[in-house]
Image (cartoon, rainbow, N blue to C red):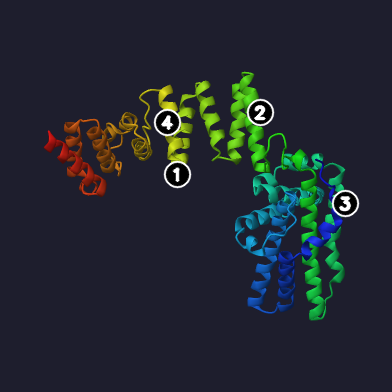
Amino acid sequence: MPRTPFWQRSREILGYPLKLPALMLLLVFGAANVMLDGMLTALFFLFVSTLLSVYAMLVIADVAQDKWEPPSPMDGISEGGLLLRQIGLMFVLFVGPFLFASASMVLALGLLALAAFILPAALMILAVSRSLRMALNPLRWLQLILTVGASYLLLWLAVMGVTAAPALLESGDAMPALVFVGAVFSGYTTLVAAAMMGALLSEKARELGLAMDEDRGRSLSMADYEVAEVLGTAHVYAQEGRLDEALKVLNRGLSSAPMHQELNWRRLRLLKLLGKEKPWLEQLARFVRQQLGAGNAGTAVQIWMEASQQKPGLKFEDDPALCLSLAQALYERGRIREAQQLLVNLHQRAPQFSGLGEAYMLLARLYLEQGSADTAQRLIGFVKKHFPKDHDSEQGAETAALLARLQTQA
């Protein structure tokens, strides 16, 4: 259903900062302004000011999801990364233009004017995506402004108005009580502006991919929306036989979401379809390493099994550590022969590999489980001679004990 236009939610927007969690932060901000006298109080003021700035971003994100209960100020303390991205955004928008001042002051002033105009859009994108790259993307600004339409100009005028309002209370020689009231009012208008921006995003949630979609039954953040858009576009291109264009789209998606599993799967399969052998091998190694590092050993094994069916005898020739990690994951899932394939003759492929002893103790275990005691014995002897620490390790002791039992039974 259509959301209420943000200008019709003035009562909720103006009352938002007066709810308890937000009001507590405003009172602390007011006290920090009154106490400002000396190094320690200056540091406290800086801390509260930055907390208020981050808190405003959390307000935008919450209200965009139609959540009208203010978050706890403690939530803002853990958002150091968001603060750094916010500082980076302001630096690029308002310091960057001065780099062009020596070439053209008109250009520099024009860029500053543009920065002031798109600032609400950039802040809204940063708040919901948590991505500085997306917040600095002109195409994202344009998408948001065109989607919002004339409401953006109304929002911009309202935000500029409420953020400029505290200047009316400024006084060079004010009493502490007036300083306190002025600071609280300044913080209040900051949160009102944030609630306005969040309310506008909430109003246009469906068009921006932020709304709960009754047909699909789930909501998408802007980052998830971007991934879904990339996957959909790549699928259409692939269906039309435009494989190179599909690959370009997936590469663009992975630049912003390098860990996304489905994007990596699609790119791996597409590279194989295109016959790009070297990029395919590089993507395979990166994807498997990524999944092992994330604790998704089962997915890593699944990736490897599909790849080894496409190219029998496949090994990671230049990465013995990855061979060992993957072989352990394969062994734990009963894939004995596939694990063996990765470790056989590893001393020839990577003679300087520091984990060679551990790898060959595992390989000996694999041979033992297949009943090849003689080969296992030779491997254990090799490890005992060249890598005594690995031979005497817990895994080594278990493998040697298993060999001894098999020899006794024979």
Q: Marks 1 and 4: CB-CB under 8 Å?
A: no
Q: Nearer the viewer, residue 241 or 305?
A: 305
Q: CA distance from mark 3 to mark 4?
A: 56 Å
Under mark 1, the amino acid is: Gly
Which quadrant is home to the C terminus?
top left
Q: CA distance from mark 2 to mark 1?
A: 29 Å
Q: Nearer the viewer, residue 199 or 19?
A: 19
The location of residue 76, given as percent across then percent down, is 65, 61
Disc on res. 304: 4
Residue ID at (18%, 39%): 403
Is 86 above or below relative to 290?
A: below
The location of residue 34, given as percent across then percent down, is 74, 77
Under mark 2, the amino acid is: Thr
Under mark 3, the amino acid is: Gln
**Tag in front: 3 or 4:** 3
From where the camera sits, is residue 96 visible? no
Q: Earlier in the sequence, mark 2 or mark 1?
A: 2
Asked which secondary structure carries label 2, the reply is: helix
Q: Earlier in the sequence, mark 3 or mark 4?
A: 3
Residue placed furthest toward the top: 241
Which quadrant is home to the N terminus?
top right
Q: CA distance from mark 1 to mark 3?
A: 49 Å
The location of residue 131, given as percent across then percent down, is 64, 47
Disc on res. 233: 2
Q: Earlier in the sequence, mark 1 or mark 3?
A: 3
Q: Which residue is mark 1?
A: 293
